[in-house]
Amino acid sequence: MRSVHQAAVSLLAVFLFVSIPSGAARATVIVSIPTDLCADPGATDIDVPIDLTNDTPPIDVRGIQLTLRDTPDELTFDQASCTSRTSGFVCTANEVSADNSITALIVDFGGGSIAPGTGAIMTIRLADAIPPCTPGSVVALDIENLLVSDVNNQPILDSVAVPGSFTCGCPTTTTVTTTSTTVTTITTTSTTLLPTTTTSTTVVTTTSSSSSTSTSLEPTTTTTTMPPTTTTSTTVVTTTSSTTSTSSTTSSTTVTTVTTTSTLLTSTTTEPTTTTTASTTTTSTTLGGLVPGGPLSKTEPDCYLELRVAGVQNGTATVEDNRKILCIDGDPCDLGPCDDLACDMHVAACVNQTDANLPDCTPPVGGLERAKIRSAFDIQIPEVLAEPACTPDVDVHIEVRLNKGGKYLEKKSRVKLKGKARALAGTKPRSDKDKWILQCVPRLTPCPD
């Protein structure tokens, strides 16, 4: 981080943490930074809360000292302030430009302490440096050199630092214009009965006798009936209107049908019937899981060979230096039970990948000549090296290790892997050498629902 102003904290650190009696306190406290911080490029008011959880078990905290580091070096220090939990305390910070860090201190010289609870105890305001950050880029906010003391100025040994992250550019609200179409269909049916024609014919019958002659007329009727004539006409009227919705896509269609039937003697009318159908479309994003193997200082060949870890997103606090994967027991990266002091991870090997986190790495033309991964697990290399490919997932089980006093043993709760890939002759750079660390971190908060 590049310095904006200086604040003296070294003397305060000596007051809190140098003259410490024997018999350090045993309790678990968590100092953390949120992972959902964001601001627009060039922002000057990026507030980073420093959260303290000291209620499991309850313990009063006298003071805290820590180092905050942003990777990559994108943000600058502006000021530090206390919160409602540390009213009356001294909350100060000092930027050390030589090693890109901020040293922060929280203490009450009057002997006060931070009561058991959860929430922010300090806010560090940062600003986006010039040139401004690239939208979508992620800056890791790591907590280092954490020291926490109890009311007797003794260090609380089981103090855990949980890093956070800052994303350049906050999510925006998407406005979608939706069109509703109303179709009205009118059907008219008419039946006309044509006149009936009757023709009368007179037949004359003559009977002769000696005395008289008689003539009788017998009416004969012939009926001709014309069939009814039916005429059907259909008229379609279409009306289009526009509506606007926010953060969703909705299509609505309204159909109205009116039917009229008429005859010479009777008329039947059916009332309009309206049917409305609505559908909603939801868009979701699946996190990618490619981890190059580092380091950040050498990324040109890093896409030749990568690990794919389920539930992990490179560029966030779950991955450090493109190689160290921190999986918290019960988080999405742990496919086993929550809070079982173990992480069950799914890991695969991938070659020739186009990785958005590695803009300066291009998969080699023609693919790889050879590749290999060394580990305690059966992680193979794809059979085809001439094109992008990944192996099936391999189950990797890592247990959380604690000492007899219940302290988390970081180095014994992780495994290491090494990889190497070599491109075809004439490719520059030709070799990709990788190292990965898979580490299981104990859960210190309730399991998600």
Image (cartoon, helix red, strand yellow):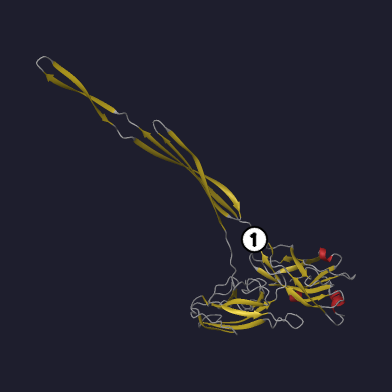
Instruction: Check disc 1 and give the amino acid type.
Output: Pro
Identify the element where label 1 is drawn. Answer: loop
Question: Is residue 59 visible to us here?
Answer: yes
Q: Pinpoint residue 34: horizontal percent, then vertical percent.
A: 71, 67
Query: Does 67 sit left or right of 16 as displayed?
Result: left
**244 w.r.t. 432: above or below:** above
Quadrant location of the N terminus in the rendered image: bottom right
Residue 302: quarter of image: bottom right
Residue 316, percent from left and from top: 66, 71
Which one is in front, 391 or 18?
A: 391
Q: Which residue shows up at 86% across the image and 74% down it?
A: 151
Residue 43: x percent and y percent? 71, 62
Seen in the picture, residue 141 relative to 228 is either above or below; the reply is below
* 49 relative to 199, above or below: below
Residue 94, percent across and down?
A: 80, 71
x 39%, y 33%: residue: 263
When asked about the image quadrant of residue 48, the answer is bottom right
Q: Which residue is mark 1?
A: 171
Q: Nearer the viewer, residue 335 or 160?
A: 335
Is 306 left or right of 407, judged from the image as shown? left
Residue lying farthest left?
Answer: 210
Residue closer to the observer: 166 or 75: 166
Dot 1, crowdedness within 10 Å: few (<14), some or many (≥20)? few
User: Residue at (78%, 69%) from the top-left corner?
Assistant: 52
Query: Which residue ends up furthest to the right in the rendered image?
Result: 110
Examine the image and state in which quarter residue 208 appears. top left
Report if residue 122 is visible in the image. Answer: no
Q: Is residue 441 left or right of residue 422?
A: right
